[in-house]
């Protein structure tokens, strides 16, 4: 199906944001917050990190000014969209003293504006986990079903990005309602493609001019250039088998000597989904609450079963995490659990790099195979 492609200037982007707001969406986009690019509500393009970019490396993140007024001249900040679809803390049930369920406030209707291709891929992975793997999660479904997604192609990959290796960027991946490409040559403009019927309706209401072929070609070139400037790469050929084959490698202990088991990597990761449940009672006994909170396989209690924890060492916990991400996720959900966003590298306080550790395990496996 051929979907419409239009060209917008910055005023057109403002009209698009206003239109989504007028349609009842809470528009969430990248914003400057706490010295990072995080996500927050916006009402115009002025609320975006205009003219800002990030410098990212293992254990390093800082904001810096650009020499232009780019709206999307950065990669990804510490937080992913899972904060909205799979919140860090959410009440999943509440009842009165007689355990009669109380009504919970419905979530807003979200429009996510500025979702990167790797993040779109991460949302699709979480769709599989929460909606398509044999059960449906009410919390996720209530936020995801009516969400409108505006994906923005990347042209400024971060120092820790490796989406090109994972097939999840920097060009758009499937799943968004609209796909935006920002062009910053002589003229600041945007190519916007519809990706769904809902996206088509929004573009029709916007009444923008069709994009010329030379502008579409310019947008494609921007993405091709970004792929060539990707901060990191990961050879995934044979990696899935290599990680399980190296389960007894001594390198796990070497990584554990650096790993603080702080769980930052799992909190920052857009696909990690583990959570725990707590029940609590108000002091007067009038309200019982069941709350779901993110959990992490890096915690000792995470693998607790009657009698003790299964993964008592840092080595076993790091091995569990990376092996699940890059190997056994395939068995469970039919895809990689990693989209190459680089967050776990940037936000690891000691700079442990998933691409370096996976590459080392792959090299070990290849060398053992060859000997
Ligand atoms: S790999 Fe880094 S971020 Fe993850 S638990 Fe270890 S120290 Fe923390
Ligand atoms: S494992 Fe790291 S690079 Fe891969 S998706 Fe998670 S945070 Fe991003």
Image (tube, rainbow, N blue to C red):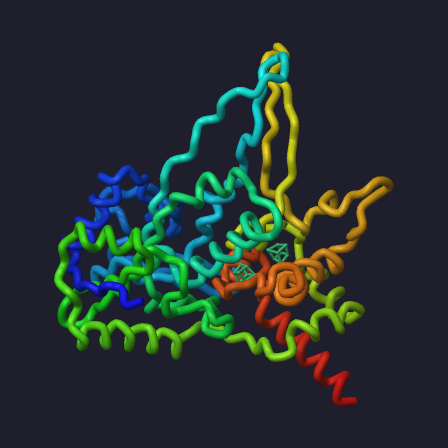
| Residue at 52% across, 38% down | 139
Indicate the position of residue 178 as horizontal and vertical percent values.
30, 57
Q: Is residue 311 visible?
A: yes
Q: Nearer the viewer, residue 35 or 97?
A: 97
| Residue at 38% across, 46% down | 147
Q: Nearer the viewer, residue 263 or 57?
A: 263
| Residue at 17% across, 68% down | 211
Ligand 2 quadrant in view = bottom right
Q: Nearer the viewer, residue 90 or 361?
A: 90
Indicate the position of residue 75 as horizontal and vertical percent values.
38, 62
Q: Is residue 269 visible?
A: no
Of all residues shown, which one is farthest toward the top?
284
Q: Nearer the viewer, residue 182 or 328?
A: 328
Q: Quadrant of the C terminus?
A: bottom right
The image quadrant that residue 219 belongs to is bottom left
Indicate the position of residue 315 as horizontal and vertical percent values.
74, 60
| Residue at 59% across, 66% down | 354
Q: Is residue 43 left or right of residue 107?
A: left
Work out whether 150 lies above or below 145: below
Count all numbered tags in the image, as a single digit: 0
The image quadrant that residue 158 belongs to is bottom left
Of all residues shown, which one is farthest toward the front?
1
Of all residues shown, which one is farthest toward the bottom?
371
Q: Is residue 151 left or right of residue 273?
A: left
Indicate the position of residue 150 as horizontal and vertical percent values.
32, 54
Q: Quadrant of the N terminus?
A: bottom left
Q: Is residue 84 left or right of residue 187?
A: right
Work out whether 71 lies above or below 44: below
């Amino acid at each position: 199906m051929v979907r419409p492609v239009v060209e917008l200037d910055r005023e057109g982007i403002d009209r698009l944001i206003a239109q989504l707001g007028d349609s009842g969406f809470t528009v969430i986009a990248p914003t400057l917050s706490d010295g990072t690019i995080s996500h927050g509500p916006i009402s115009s393009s002025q609320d975006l990190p205009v003219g800002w970019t990030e410098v990212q490396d293992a254990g390093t993140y800082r904001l810096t000014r650009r020499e232009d007024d780019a709206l999307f001249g950065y990669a990804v900040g510490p937080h992913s969209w899972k904060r909205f679809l799979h919140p860090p803390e959410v009440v999943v049930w509440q009842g009165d003293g007689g355990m009669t369920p109380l009504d919970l406030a419905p979530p807003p209707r979200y429009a996510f504006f500025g979702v990167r291709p790797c993040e779109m891929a991460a949302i699709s992975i979480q769709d599989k986990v929460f909606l398509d793997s044999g059960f449906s999660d009410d919390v996720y479904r209530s936020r995801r079903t009516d969400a409108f997604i505006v994906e923005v192609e990347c042209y400024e990959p971060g120092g820790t990005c490796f989406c090109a290796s994972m097939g999840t960027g920097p060009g758009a991946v499937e799943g968004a309602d609209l796909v935006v490409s920002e062009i910053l040559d002589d003229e600041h403009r945007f190519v916007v493609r519809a990706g769904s019927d809902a996206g088509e309706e929004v573009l029709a209401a916007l009444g923008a001019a069709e994009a010329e072929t030379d502008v579409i070609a310019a947008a494609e070139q921007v993405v091709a250039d970004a792929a060539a400037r990707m901060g990191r790469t990961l050879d995934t050929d044979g990696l899935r088998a290599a990680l399980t084959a190296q389960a007894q490698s001594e390198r796990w202990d070497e990584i554990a000597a650096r790993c603080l088991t702080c769980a930052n990597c799992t909190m920052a990761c857009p696909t990690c989904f583990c959570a725990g449940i707590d029940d609590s009672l108000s002091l007067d006994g009038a309200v019982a609450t069941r709350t779901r909170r993110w959990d992490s396989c890096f915690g000792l209690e995470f693998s607790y079963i009657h009698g003790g924890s299964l993964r008592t060492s840092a080595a076993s916990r790091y091995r569990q995490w990376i092996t699940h991400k890059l190997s056994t996720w395939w068995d469970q959900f039919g895809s990689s659990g990693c989209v190459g966003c680089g967050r776990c590298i940037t936000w690891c306080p000691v700079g442990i790099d998933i691409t370096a550790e996976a590459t080392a395990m792959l090299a070990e496996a290849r060398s053992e195979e060859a000997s």
